Image (cartoon, grey):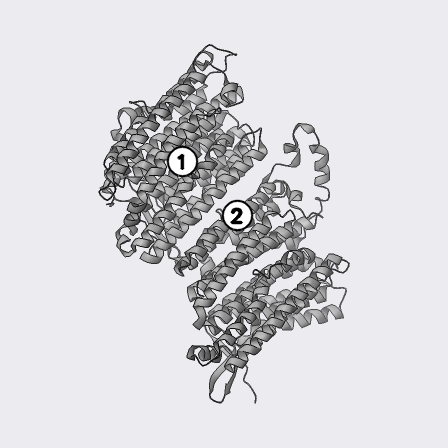
Amino acid sequence: MIGGLEIIIGLPLLGALVVLLLSRRDTVAAWVGVAFGSATLAGSVVPWAATIDDGGGYVARSDTAWIRALDVRWALGLDRLSAPLVVLTALLSWCCLVALVRRAPSCGARPGLVALVLVLESASIGTFAALDLIVFFVFFELVLIPMWFVIADWGDEHDPVGRRRAATRFLVTTVTGSALMLVGFLLLHARTGTFDVTELPSRAGQIGAGTQVLVAVLFLLGFGAKVPVWPLHFWLPDAHSKAPTVGSVLLAGVLLKLGTYGLLRFWADVPDGAVRVAPYLGALGVVGIVYGALACLAQTDLKRLIAYSSVGHMGFVLLAISTLTEQGRLAANFANVAHGIITALLFFVVGAVKDRVGTTELAGIGRALYARAPHLGAAFGFAAVASLGLPGLAGFWGEMLSMLAAYSPAAALSRSTYVVFMVVAGLGAVLTTAYFVVAIRRVCQGVPDRDAVGDVGRDEWVAWSPLVASVLALGIFPVIMLWSGSASALAGRR
Amino acid sequence: MTQAVDWVAIAPPLSLVIAALTALLVDAAWPRVRVLAGLVSLTGVVVALGFTMSGRNEARSTFCFADGELPTSCSWLVDDVTSAWWLIMLIATALVVLLLWTAAVSGELPAGELHFLVLASAAGALAVAAAQDLITLLVAMETVSLPAFALVGLRRVDRRGAEAALKFFITSVVATALSLLGISMVYGATGSVAAGPVAASIASGNAVTPVIGVGMVLTVVALGFKVAAVPFQAWVPDTYVGAPIPVAGYLSVVSKAAGLAGLTIVLVRFLATYVDTWSTMVGVAAALTMTVGNLGALRQRHIVRLLAWSSVAQAGYLLVPLAAGGLPEDVTALQAYALMYAVVNLTAFAAALAVASWGKSDLADCMGLARSHPWIGGSLAFALLCLAGLPPGVVGLVAKVAIFRSAVDGDLIWLAVIVGVNVAIGLVYYLRFLAVLVQPAASDVAGPAGVGAHDEDDHWAGLDRAVPWSTEFVVGITLAAAVVLSVFPGLLFSAIS
């Protein structure tokens, strides 16, 4: 049976095949990519709308036997937790594909990169849509090889050895994590007898407390390597600084979300274990917020700075997840989507800067972007203030809601601990403001010390405008996301 | 006393033996028509495969004897597990015969002897999977090994080959001697060498336990040698490099499968009572084997040497389901993994053979292979992904999931975690190889120094030589199998059950 989700997963794959087999010319390949990306984006909105209409269950489900011997079923479906992330994936992939129409990657051939972006899109959507643990695992792993190629072969043109090392470090860390996650999945199956994501939460009672803690820890390590949770973040700055622009966008905007989504989704299967491990996750998240902010202040490279800021933002998401409340799930999902959009925009802008001046070093970029390229400077300023959490933009609500959630964690958790977390997170938010303001001062303001550079082109506006619009829309009407997200409340969770 | 022999039960190995002898005879009779021996042996394997498939789903035993008060015991049992092993071994043997085709036809290796030795060894491997008593098992294991020594040393003018054969031979003989000692101890302690009586004697507690324990450990040693489990892995890299590449492929797949089949029989049919003891032992051996194999592979720059170390690591993964207790679902996981491994590992060896036919042997020589020779290079890349267990090589991933599942269901979480870490270590070298394969041709990366153009001429010298059709055929058919199994991984499990 071919359902709607198979179509959204299959379209980009088909697109990748078409690009690889038929498109010899760069622009043709890019346009083919855009066509398939647009179709997928349009298709992804349908189940999202359906989840809002629906009472909160899973929509667009399909379920057929896949590997009988392992009790694995090809089961897909979306609920209000996963549907927004699918739209986010399709949107960011679309932006990446549009960005590739006029601008060639700095090294490597364009058709290959277009195809890899499409494969990444397909695999990520598949991961969010999987309703069987093993199918989830297969898609989760399918993301890795394309991303490895994107970083290793299309990355920093000045450093072929470094980009390969960064790519391999990313891959090895994630695979170690995902192997632990697989062990967790199989433990769940050994105790409950099912890989069915929709069934598992209701069977949590069949799992002993010790096993629940073990599984929760395995998930923390497994998904934590992907998020990344401090101190497992060591691969992230290198991967981001060596990746091409579209690679960074998808890495930050989509791949990190696979980790937080996994925690949100699968910790619910081991509630007793999650309660025991959650304070540690909260603590690691808060450390990540402060550490990310301090590390940012020390960066001289804009891409590394954004990478470390991601560690901080993900810290807020982790803090929200660790509260184990419905409000926390809501905040985490909101912060997830907001971070995806804002960081994608930041990486696009920084990529555009790199196209023009050839570097992302602060010293190499020079000052006064406002004067040298007004629109580009404005775009950077906008993305930066969105990221630091200016009220009225999307980033604000993510941080705000996370801290609010930490103010009243689940009853089984120690409230005083979480209030301390909240205060430290607030401090981190202040530091975040500091480093982005410093970055804006260094890059955008001041007296021009070198020549003007080309301003934002029309194609770039096309690629960025959905992101700018989303940042504004989510900032002014957070209810869009809260409403569809609140939802996950009704999705059969506790 | 005359015995009734169930010819159907022994038909597959028998057809291999007949084909082996015929190959030798036709080659002696018509030495100029070198293709004959290959045709005969391929026919033999296909016939054996046919007998195996038609005989599935019914258990048959033969060579039975009743001895006074002891219950009737049979030396030969063909059940679902045996048939699945036969399927794996015969498919792999057919592929190896094809890989050897060109070497035999061109006269590089003596056609008659070559095919005779391969089929004789394969017949031994089939016998291992059906053996139900320790003597049959030992004789079968030796039937696998003795022709293999000759195969390894078959290259007429290659000193490395002779040295490799000698190393292989000495290690193997020591292992055999130890296991003979072990068998005699088991016989002394239980009064039997057949599976049923030995297991019954152990279960009843009448046997002298320490003697049986030592005896069984020694018996397992010979099998550990075949599987190339630590500490018997040292012969592998030199032997694989010294042997003709298809023979190395044979050792890594068929000979290893024979070892695993034998190990399964000894552990599950003879020693089921001691499962707690040997489960830990096999688990530790599995963990050490995969770790040593992966760490060894990290430093390799020679294609076959890398594949040799990788096959040691894979042997470690293959031992995991046995460590989990060797229950029926564990054996299914083991065989599914073995089938996957047989197919993709032979893709890799076939590709190595193609590269060797251009006179190349190092990783560095494969630079850009996936671009310059998409067929060979692309297949090799896919095989490496399957061995690493990463999508798009889904079949490798699913087989690994089955292994993990055995470990977790057997409550061996520690082993599952070690497997996970090893999968990550393995990635480093599989990906390094993959990166070399997909790298743009040398001139693109040589940079401003301008040495690229000249080097590249040199680099691809000899690449205009065509790859033998039989090698290309093996690459193609194994790739097709791996791709189909990646889309429908369920087929992997239905093939062996």
Which residue is identified by label 2? Answer: B425
Q: Residue at x 42, y 41 (%)?
A: A225
Q: Residue at x 64, y 46 (%)?
A: B301
x, y percentage for residue A166? 52, 36
Front-most of residues A340 and A88: A340
Q: From this viewpoint, which residue is outermost toward the top?
A: A447
Residue B477 visible in the picture = no
The answer to whether residue A461 is above or below residue A491 is: above
The chain identifier of the residue carrying mark 2 reads B
- Circle 2: element type: helix
Mark 2: few, some, or many residues within 10 Å (few <14, many ≥20)? many
| Mark 1 vs mark 2, CA separation in Å | 26 Å
Q: Residue at x 42, y 20 (%)?
A: A439
Picture quarter containing residue A426?
top left
Q: Which mark is residue A254?
A: 1
Front-most of residues B475 and B341: B341
Locate residue B468 relative to residue A430 in the image: left or right: right
Is there one chain holding both mark 1 and mark 2?
no
Q: Residue at x 71, y 70 (%)?
A: B24
Residue B290 visible in the picture = yes
Locate residue B108 relative to residue B292 in the image: left or right: right
Amino acid type of disc 2?
Answer: Ile
Mark 1: few, some, or many residues within 10 Å (few <14, many ≥20)? many
1 and 2 marks in contact (CB < 8 Å): no
x, y percentage for residue A222? 41, 45
Locate residue B1 relative to residue A321 in the image: left or right: right
x, y percentage for residue A363? 51, 19
